[in-house]
Amino acid sequence: MSGFLHTGLRVALLVLLGAIPLPGAIAPALAQSAYPVSLPVYGNWCGPDYPANPARAAPPVDALDAACMRHDMCTAARGSFDCGCDLGLLNELRATRWPNPLIGRNARAIYDAIALTPCNSPGGMAAKQSMFAADLFGDMATGRGTPMDVVDRWRQIITGR
């Protein structure tokens, strides 16, 4: 994959996750679009606004997908970008022992994305960022990872490679 395309995927994901704000005129238009962005990331439930129609979604494929489904049900009940729903998902993903490295990597990519996505409370956002930073610095201190691993996990989960 070319460097330009690689960078474009990163920027697109960061915009979709809300980490990079869109210019003033574009953001309201996207928010009011009749075609919301639905980005499948993993299984039947993981991804921004995915599934597009939860009432018609297939059942979760595994424990990670089930965690995403519970998060989706929580945000449906409490509102999009609810910090409590996000923190619940982050804690669940942190506590689960994944059956293989691929699912573990995908869970960590989703964890990273949710941790960095803005939510509706400054205190909740601070808690999410603290969890993310503690895990990232823990990985660095133990030699298990680098900051670029975050972007690499996102690339792998989006491209399937």
Image: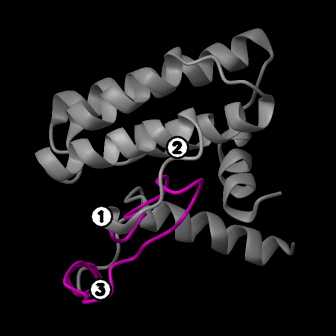
Where is 156 relative to 20, above or below? Answer: above
Residue 152 placement, left or right of 79: right
Residue 133 is one of the magenta-drawn residues = no
> Image quadrant for the N terminus?
bottom right
Residue 44 is one of the magenta-drawn residues = yes
Which residue is under mark 1?
55
Q: Nearer the viewer, residue 52 or 94?
A: 52
Q: Nearer the viewer, residue 152 or 101?
A: 101
Helix or strand or loop: what does disc 1 sit on?
helix
Q: Residues within 10 Å of mark 2 (few under 14, many from 20)?
A: many
Which residue is under mark 2?
65
Which residue sits at x=33%, y=62%?
54
The location of residue 41, given as percent across then percent down, is 58, 58
Which residue sits at x=51%, y=47%?
60
Where is 114 relative to 92, above or below? Answer: below
Looking at the image, do the residues carrying marks 3 and 1 touch, with CB atoms under 8 Å apart?
A: no
Do we see residue 112 in this rendering? no
Q: CA distance from mark 1 to mark 2?
A: 16 Å
Q: CA distance from mark 2 to mark 3?
A: 31 Å
Q: Residues within 10 Å of mark 3 (few under 14, many from 20)?
A: few
Which residue is under mark 3?
26
Which residue sits at x=83%, y=57%?
161
Residue span colored magenta:
27-53
Looking at the image, do the residues carrying marks 2 and 3 touch, with CB atoms under 8 Å apart?
A: no
**What's under tag 3, amino acid-wise?**
Ile
Residue 9 placement, left or right of 50: right
The location of residue 97, given as percent across then percent down, is 63, 17
